[in-house]
Amino acid sequence: MEDEVFLEQVIVYGIVFLLCAIVIFFYTRKKRVKSEDVEKKVHIAKEEGLFEPVSLYPHIDLKSCIGSAACVADCPEKDILGIVDGVATVINTANCIGHGACFHACPVEAISLRIGTETRGVDLPHVNQNFETNTKGIYIAGELGGMGLIKNSVEQGQQAIDSIVKSKKPSKPNVIDVLIVGAGPAGISATLAAKKHGLTSVTLEQDSLGGTVYTFPRSKIVMTAPMDLPLYGKAKLYDTSKDELLQLWKKVITEHDIKITENTKVEQIIPIENDTFKVITLMGDEYICNHILLAIGRRGTPRKLNVPGEESTKVAYRLLEPERIKNKKVLVVGGGDSAIETVLLLKDENEAILSYRKDKFSRLKPKNKEKIEQAINDKSVKVIYNSNLVSIHDDHVMITINENDQPEKLDNDLVYIFAGGELPTGFLQKSGVNITKRFGYVMKRHD
Ligand SMILES: Cc1cc2nc3c(=O)[nH]c(=O)nc-3n(C[C@H](O)[C@H](O)[C@H](O)COP(=O)(O)OP(=O)(O)OC[C@H]3O[C@@H](n4cnc5c(N)ncnc54)[C@H](O)[C@@H]3O)c2cc1C
């Protein structure tokens, strides 16, 4: 009898043990499969050059991380974070736009928001808590200071103007109180705040009103949070669109009779007598001002080729709405990922030619490499290697193929140039703003 009870107990414990083992087996297998999936994504991100951060990104303290995955769940972007073997890891870090949702979601404070890594520094300008740089009278707001996102930039734009007002530098006759460089979220908000405070101001934008937001695809969901917009009040926006944001900004600007000058690049800032500055634009216009607010973001300026005809309206340095471009003869210039992605987006509905100055592509993302090779093979894209654009005309362009040859004529409707970009670092240094390379620098709000 006792033996029977013992046997029964052994069987029951055995079954329980087996069930537990099965559950644990499937649980760990599922976790391993998920980990392997994330590891694969990290591998691809490294190959595609997306693993290294370019701006603000989450840094995970592996000793504190408990693998709750709250950061993964709260990140509004895709595949920025994942879990490998029970701890969080970054994946496509270069795509992180610094929402900071992961930082707030982590239950054990294992995430800090950083700029630069231990091996790769990021240039950050010196700005104090009043947004003023080491050059008295020059202020910085928005992503240029390191803290991205639309809401932060809007807040910083008006806070910087508040600081300018508080600085009590007296207004001077025939001198603009504040000249704002850049009309992204920070510059727009600063322009409205300047008007609200009764300052005289001029806002110069090298491109289009909206800054980086203007370049978003029309279909993108823009994630933001309610924010105070000067002269408007609380803008209760959460998931919105580029158009809704641009319309809101334009409405407030028009209602208050404010002018923002687009297509005007600021080239030089020179401190002059009386504690004022002379600001010179690319076209040679000059402004004298008491304060300067740099709201120029961190994305830089597309590099120009400086060829005759480049100022034509048929020339662009980015592709905004590929779906609207049909039945055109398009020339894309460049051999990097942006040029390749552009020509691939245009090839199906247009006659697409890619002109590249070298004899082969190098350092392309593997997917782009594969797709362009396929497009060359099926003749949907014509690539002209060793070629240089010489001049741009209404209905054609001239290019040289091989350096010493005579230029050839190509019929053409549109030109897209991707010749890299100049980062704002040089411009800042020229303007007397100190910059330090930051390696894994922990950012705090308004740092
Ligand atoms: C793909 C992508 C998706 C994003 N999605 C979101 C999102 O969903 N939600 C969110 O909150 N944020 C998002 N962001 C981040 C957000 O766009 C930026 O943080 C924000 O635009 C920064 O605002 P800013 O005013 O500081 O700079 P910017 O918007 O970059 O504006 C700077 C302006 O200065 C101009 N400028 C530069 N140099 C000069 C010069 N010398 N003279 C005159 N003008 C000059 C530039 O042309 C530009 O218009 C995203 C960013 C990217 C790249």
Image: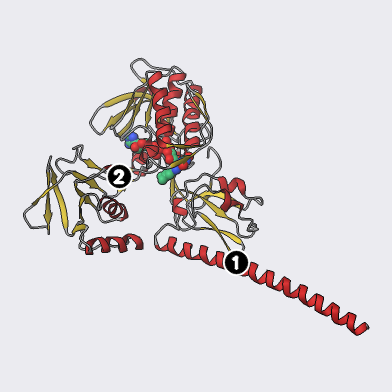
The image shows residue 379 at horizontal and vertical percentages of: 20, 60
Q: How packed is label 1: few (under 14 Cα within 10 Å), some, or many (20 or more)?
A: few
**Ligand 1 quarter of the rendering:** top left
Using the rendered view, name the quadrant where residue 8 is placed.
bottom right
Q: Amino acid at mark 2?
A: Glu
Q: Earlier in the sequence, mark 2 or mark 1?
A: 1
Report whether 12 appears left or right of 135.
right
Residue at (12, 45) in percent of width and height:
396
Q: Disc 2 and disc 1: Cα gap in Å?
A: 41 Å
Above or below, comparing residue 343 to residue 218 in the picture: below
| Relative depth, front residue between 164 and 353 | 353
Local SS, label 1: helix
Instruction: In the rendered view, tell whether residue 136 sits above or below residue 329.
Output: above
Compared with 157, 67 (above or below) is below
- Residue type at mark 1 is Lys
- Residue 292 occupies quadrant: top left
The residue at which mark 2 appears reads as 323
SS assignment at label 2 = helix
Residue extending farthest top: 173
Give the labeled residue for mark 1: 30
